[in-house]
Image (cartoon, rainbow, N blue to C red):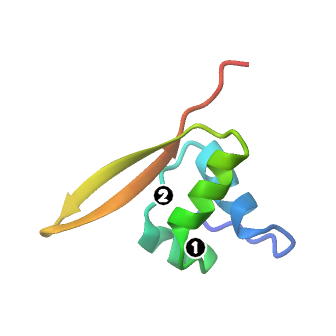
Amino acid sequence: MQIKDNNMTQNEKILKHLQDGNSITPLEALKLFGCFRLSARILDLRGQGHQIITDTVTHNGKKFASYYLIKSKV
């Protein structure tokens, strides 16, 4: 699901994607949001207090990160 709002920053788009219950990988971030440095955006979001978990995924012998958001119980 690509978020089309051009007024949103990459951080905002990625956060919305995660808040919608999706995980995200670097390749998905590039395809969906034109984001080449997902890990930097995740660091920004963690700095804002969002609890984001990193899973290491192995696919076809390649390892990469997959991120997802822990939803707060508010």
Secondary structure at numbered mark 2: loop
- Percent of width and height locating residue 6: 82, 76
Q: Is residue 14 above or below residue 62?
A: above
Amino acid type shown at disc 1: Leu
Tag of residue 24:
2
Identify the image quadrant of residue 4. bottom right
Tag of residue 51:
none
- Percent of width and height locating residue 21: 56, 42
Q: Residue at x 82, y 67 (%)?
A: 8
Give the mark nearest the N terminus, 1 or 2: 2
Q: Is residue 58 left or right of residue 17?
A: left
Secondary structure at numbered mark 1: helix
- Percent of width and height locating residue 30: 52, 77
Identify the image quadrant of residue 49. top right
Amino acid type shown at disc 2: Ile
Q: Which residue is mark 1?
A: 32
Q: Is the residue under label 2 in contact with that under label 1 (CB below 8 Å)?
A: yes
Quarter placement of the C terminus:
top right
- Judging depth in this view, the residue of 19 and 64 nearest the camera is 64
Q: Residue at x 53, y 67 (%)?
A: 38
Identify the image quadrant of residue 34. bottom right
Residue neighbourhood size for the residue with mark 1, other residues' Cα within 10 Å, grouped as few (<14), some (14–19), many (≥20): some
Q: Residue at x 75, y 59 (%)?
A: 12
Q: CA distance from mark 1 to mark 2?
A: 10 Å
Q: Is residue 61 left or right of residue 40?
A: left
- Judging depth in this view, the residue of 2 and 15 nearest the camera is 15
